Amino acid sequence: MDGRTREYLRGRFGDYYRRASVSPPPATNEREWGYITWSDGGTTMIRHRSHLDLVGGGDLGDFLAGERPRHAYFSAGRYDDPGAGSMGRKGWRGSDLVFDLDADHLPGVDPETDGYAAMLSACKDALLRLLDLLESDLGFEDMTIVFSGGRGYHVHVRDPGVAELDRRARREVVDYLLGEGIAFDDVVRTEAVAGSAGRSSPAQKRSLPDGGWAGRTRDRLEAFVDELLAAEESAALERLRSFDGIGEGKATAALSAARDNRAALASGNVDVHPAVYGLARRLFERVVAEEAAPIDEPVTTDINRLIRLPGSLHGGSGLAVRRIDRADVDDFDPLVDAVPETFVGNDIAVYVREPTTVELGGESFSFPEGVHSVPEYAGIFAMTRGHATKAGE
């Protein structure tokens, strides 16, 4: 990025911060703060700052408007002395449980071929899966949901019970959300039942209890069985045969057992027939693959992680790091809702280095190489991503 572009962006970021109202996180004075400047190369990180180090006698808004950082961060961790120059001297008190979803790292997403809008759409789907797991399975309620301003989302959990979790405990949370190390036999509950006449020991029944991955599998099995029973027999058998390892014989047996034991299946019993047990196992594999949340593991396990400040600007896109109310997640469109008002309504001249497409503000712009007059938000997006430079007006 050349000097003219850097100074233009720094100036306009300052204009944004002079108009914006950026709210600090809870326990502001206990957190480490950091930011990246607009220096040549754009990678100079200033960190190990307390809130007081940043603002002095002013407030956070004054600092942001004056420094005009390229990126701004605060720590998930809370400390006795957040401004100490090493982690060992800070005196850790606890940390938020933070989850990061990055479209670059999602299964099935190729950053080289998928457009920005498609990547964000895939990340939104992953966010909804994550929120469902956090709320339904783990019971979290105090969550802050944030669009990162780049290619993903952050979720901050501040329930009192998570603050003192160490790295190992956070790793267990990660494994659960990713569905790693969870086997079907681990989620099945085995219980003794009254044995048949002549048996010397009780019989056993295997079932899927409510809640967690077992409950999700149970719900999927019930819905699948209902679909089978509502379909023509030939179609139902064909659906069963679509599973690896289920041939004609097992398909017929599973359909017959499902038809004759619908009430038992509704109670979670998967021992009505070996073929049904095998079907439940295969559905469990699908549930984990389709409903797990592909979070970035190091972010959650790092108790000292710096995370983007909601309300700040992302220096790699020019978009705002937006806090999202839980009720608004479904309708949130980052390509519209994260475009700063400060950058709307003006046209600027940019030199596009290579053919570039920008999808923002509900519009799609395709720019060939050369100088163009473009909406400022589109020009800032192209400049921050390195596809364009500021041209003379």
Image (cartoon, helix red, strand yellow):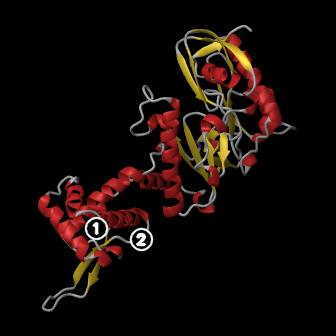
Front residue of 186/391: it is 391
- x and y percent of residue 334 in the render? 61, 38
Looking at the rendered image, the quarter that the N terminus falls into is: top right
**Residue extending farthest right:** 57
Return the x and y of residue 5 as percentages of the image width and height.
68, 14
Q: Quadrant of the C terminus?
A: top right
- Asked which secondary structure carries label 2, the reply is loop
Query: Where is 176 relative to 268, above or below?
Result: above
C-alpha gap between disc 1 and disc 2: 23 Å
Residue furthest to the front in view is: 232
Q: In this view, does 16 lie above or below 99?
A: above
Foreground residue, 97 or 258? 258
According to the image, label 1 marks what residue? 229
Give the quarter of the image for residue 249.
bottom left
| Local secondary structure at mark 1 | helix
Image quadrant assignment for residue 24: top right
Q: Contact (CB < 8 A) between labels 1 and 2?
A: no
Instruction: Judge whether residue 167 can be spotted in this image.
Output: no
Instruction: Provide the residue designation for mark 2.
Output: 210
| Tag in front: 1 or 2 | 1
Residue 246 coordinates in the image, percent (x, y): 17, 57
Residue type beneath disc 1? Leu
* Crowd around label 2: few <14 · some 14–19 · many ≥20 (10 Å): some
Of all residues, the one furthest to the bottom in this rendering is 197
Q: Give the residue at x 69% y 11%.
A: 3
Whether residue 328 is situated above or below residue 271 in the rendered picture? above
Q: Where is residue 325 in the image (x, y as percent from the top left)?
A: 66, 51
Q: Quadrant of residue 256?
A: bottom left
User: Which residue corresponds to the image point at 66% horizontal and 22% vertical from the top-left?
Assistant: 380
The amino acid type of the residue labelled 2 equals Asp
Q: Viewed as shown, does residue 143 lie left or right of 116?
A: right
Q: Which of marks 1 and 2 is nearer the N terminus?
A: 2
